[in-house]
Image (tube, helix red, strand yellow):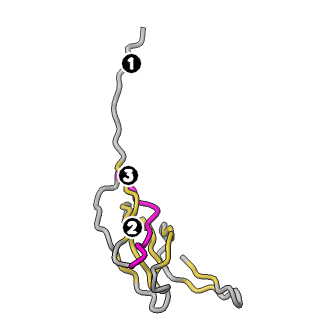
Amino acid sequence: MVLVSPDDGRISTLVHEPVHSWPNDWAPNSDQIVFAGLRNGVWNIFWVSRSTGRVQQLTHFQSQSGFVRYPSWSPRGDRVIFEREDLSANIYVVDLR
């Protein structure tokens, strides 16, 4: 994940891991960006600080059969809401004639 300066186009890398990091929203303090991240095959919610580069994991899901997306800060900055989807499958049998 990178941040591009609107003033001079300078690129600052915020998240260095070569994995999925899908940013979605800025915190009300204009420093933290909340994102959905895939780490070790599991999706969780994280934030990264623009000023310090610190990354903080907010959720601790362990199942590889689901994903999270669209995290957003509350206006007061005291909550993050997001979508979580658990995937499941059914097995069917078809008789062949």
Which of the two residues, 50 or 64, is positioned nearer the viewer here? Answer: 50
Secondary structure under tag 3 reads: strand
Please tell me whether mark 1 sits on a helix, a strand or a loop. Answer: loop
Local crowd at mark 3 within 10 Å, few (<14), some, or many (≥20)? few
What numbered label is drawn on residue 85? 3
Amino acid at the residue labelled 1: Val
| Label 2 or label 3, whichever comes before in sequence order | 2
- Magenta stretch: helix, strand or loop mostly: strand
C-alpha span from label 1 to label 2: 38 Å
Q: Is residue 58 above or below residue 53?
A: above
What's drawn in magenta, residue-wise? Answer: 65-76
- Residue at (48, 91) in percent of width and height: 51
Quick one: which residue is furthest to the right in this view? Answer: 8
Image spot of residue 25 (x, y percent) = 50, 73
Mark 3: which amino acid? Glu
Q: Which callout, 1 or 2, points at the residue further toward the start of the chain?
A: 2
Residue 72 among those drawn in magenta: yes
Provide the residue designation for mark 2.
Answer: 39
Q: CA distance from mark 2 to mark 3?
A: 16 Å
Q: Is residue 45 above or below residue 95?
A: below
- Quarter residue 62 falls in: bottom left
Left or right, 28 with respect to 6, comes to left
